[in-house]
Amino acid sequence: MSKKNIDNIIALAKDLRWQIGDDYHDSLIESIYADAAEIVNDTVTKDKEKSKFRLDAKIDKIVTSRIWGFPIMLLVLGVVLWLTIIGANYPSSLLAELLLDSIHPVLKNLGTSIGFPWWLNGFLFDGVYLAVAWVIAVMLPPMAIFFPLFTLLEDFGYLPRVAFNMDALFKKSGAHGKQALTMSMGFGCNAAGVVATRIIDSPRERLIAIITNNFSLCNGRWPTQILLATIFIGAVVPKSYSSFASLSAVIGIAVLGIFFMFFFSWALSKTVLKGEVSTFNLELPPYRPPVFWKTIYTSLIDRTLIVLWRAIVFAAPAGAVIWLISNIYIGNESIAAWTVYSLDGFGFLLGLNGVILLAYIVAIPANEIVIPTILMLTVMVRGISGGEGVGVMFELDSVTGTADILRAGGWTLLTAVNVMLFSLLHNPCSTTIYTIYKETNSMKWTVVASILPVIAGFIVTFLVAQVWRILV
Amino acid sequence: MKKSSNSVCDTCAHFNPDGLKKLGIKTSDFDFVVALAGNPNTGKSTVFNALTGLRQHTGNWPGKTVTRAEGAFEYNQQKFKLIDLPGTYSLLSTSEDEEVARNFILFGKPTVTVIVVDASRLERNLNLVLQILEITNKAVLCLNLIDEAERNNIQINTRILAKDLGIPIVPTNARLQKGIPELIQTISELANNKIKCKPRRIKNIPKDIEKAVQELSSALEQEYPAITNSRWIAFRLLEGDTQIIESLESGEILA
């Protein structure tokens, strides 16, 4: 076939395009719709009176109403978190008892009996093993409850309603309404949320969604929030209100994150990412009763175990690093101690401490290991020892045990509040940073997305610390 | 993998359950390529999982699948590679996710295209179905979420629908594996040319446009006798679709 003939065909198309005029596209689409209507007329019969969609419409009227939409969203989030907080406590202490109190000494004795030198024994069992055991005990129970609940909501069809409710707010902040969906994904995992921004067509609005996704509290950070709120916030109120108080604190942090997400979306769209807000259609799918056990099973296998595995993979080397920096001495102090002391001053300004800042550096690969890292560093550097020397965690069989270590490490209510804030407002984990780079293909935007939240975190914790110290 | 036997077809002589192997992500050495297309949130990913035995995450919201996922199954010693395309409402506009779907159906040349529709929203879904039928000759309509339609008192006469569209129709409830054996059987028969499709072409087009389309498509057919979707290419040429023009010039569209 010759090039000339193809050119002729293209020229013919051009001619014909002139003849048929501008409304060609619309006419074609109208014909398709007319065809569709014809076919449906012949094949579909429906009994409108009995239609169940009326029930869907009724539910939608309530959950997307101006008055009830937002309270219902908060209530749903509250119930999910409440079940997580209440439910996670018991299995957590059970796991801690098993992995830390029972298995750890056995492993250490085993190491000694087969003639491991002290440093290998310490490195393996006090470093690597303890970090992994901690991650499992602290992380597994809340994840195993939170993820399935979240997945059930997703299957039920609630997420598009959330998007619908928040659309107006996104529009006001100059962002795309579909960002509500990517934001919700971010509550599971920020890396997944960043990938999900592909549903946003406009590059400008997609960048905003990517940069601000980190303000969705991800599953690596929920347990941190829940644990700290349970220990410190729950303790300041009478016991009968304690779970309510800690619950409110966690919701407060999540909502604050959403607030920051809107604020930075707005700020970006008013400055470096100016442009029009694009419109889109969002279909509200029918509510579907989730296939309960299958959902529970798949969310446990696909989400919980994968996230847990990731945490373990990162916790093991982190545990090794922690043990090493706590046991390698420069002069008369360990590397960890030197670092912690030099960060203490800056930490104090932020209402945090050197241990926490070092933990956030060690834990860049995974947010999940922040609390275990803080605990191990506190024990090792602050010299709170259960008897077996540096780098050995003492008995921890419950949340109370965690609380005791943190208090002994100098934590106050302010420290806890600011760690909760800093957990919300700091750099994304390394996986998310890498994902942002892959999705934007731009070093510049990757750096912006990584640095912006840390700066926000420094400012917020600094202000809170100063005000707190003046008032309290 | 243990097969569930929710369907009478599992035990029927027509479907051969022993011939089925869900291969998950092992997509090498396939005999046929099968594309899964459809509107957002019609359960494409659920159908995909049911066919491949994979557990790609599904969720009840539009836009769940942003990239195309691949999987495979084996039936009667033939390997089928399955591509789960992003959900789209149409193939006529230019957003990025629609492009993935359109380019694959047009240039990826799947042996069989499975069009997944939401049975309760047939009319809206037909918009995409009619467009796909202009492009490909071998397609099956997967009338998914049929249970939901029944609960909503919507009855669909699948025989007339199959006749109107000129392709086989399989009602399914993919979440419970209902209709999946029939779907596999139909895909296999289509791939092996045991079923012949006569896909419906869009009618109701204004006369002057129809005339232009015919003129252009016969010119295309004269030039490329092997072409099967000259009408669709004519539609796109009249629209001035630069991608189609380029692919005509490079010859990619006929490869």
Image (cartoon, grey):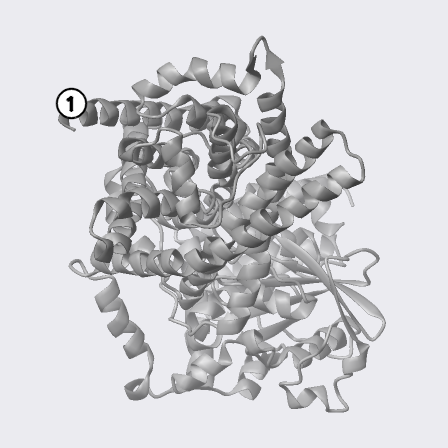
Q: Residues within 10 Å of mark 1 (few under 14, many from 20)?
A: few
Q: Residue at x 46, y 19 (%)?
A: A340
Image coordinates of residue A359 in percent, x first then y, are 48, 28
Image-based side of A404 in relation to B203, left or right:
left
Image quarter of the C terminus of chain A: top left
Q: Can residue B67 be seen?
A: no
Q: Position of residue A194 (x, y in %)?
A: 48, 41
Q: Secondary structure at mark 1?
A: helix
For the residue pair A414 and B1, the one nearer the viewer reads as: A414
- Outermost residue on the front side: it is A387
| Residue sitting nearer the eye, A11 or B180 | B180
Q: Position of residue B98 (x, y in %)?
A: 52, 51
In the shown orientation, is residue B147 left or right of residue A217? right
In the orientation shown, which residue stands out farthest toward the top? A331
Count the marks: how many?
Answer: 1
B112 sits to left or right of A454: right
Q: Chain for mark 1?
A: A
- Residue wearing tag 1: A470
Residue at 59% over, 33% down: A388
Give the residue type that dot 1 points to: Ile
Q: Quadrant of residue A414?
A: top left
Is B12 situated left or right of A83 in this image?
Answer: right
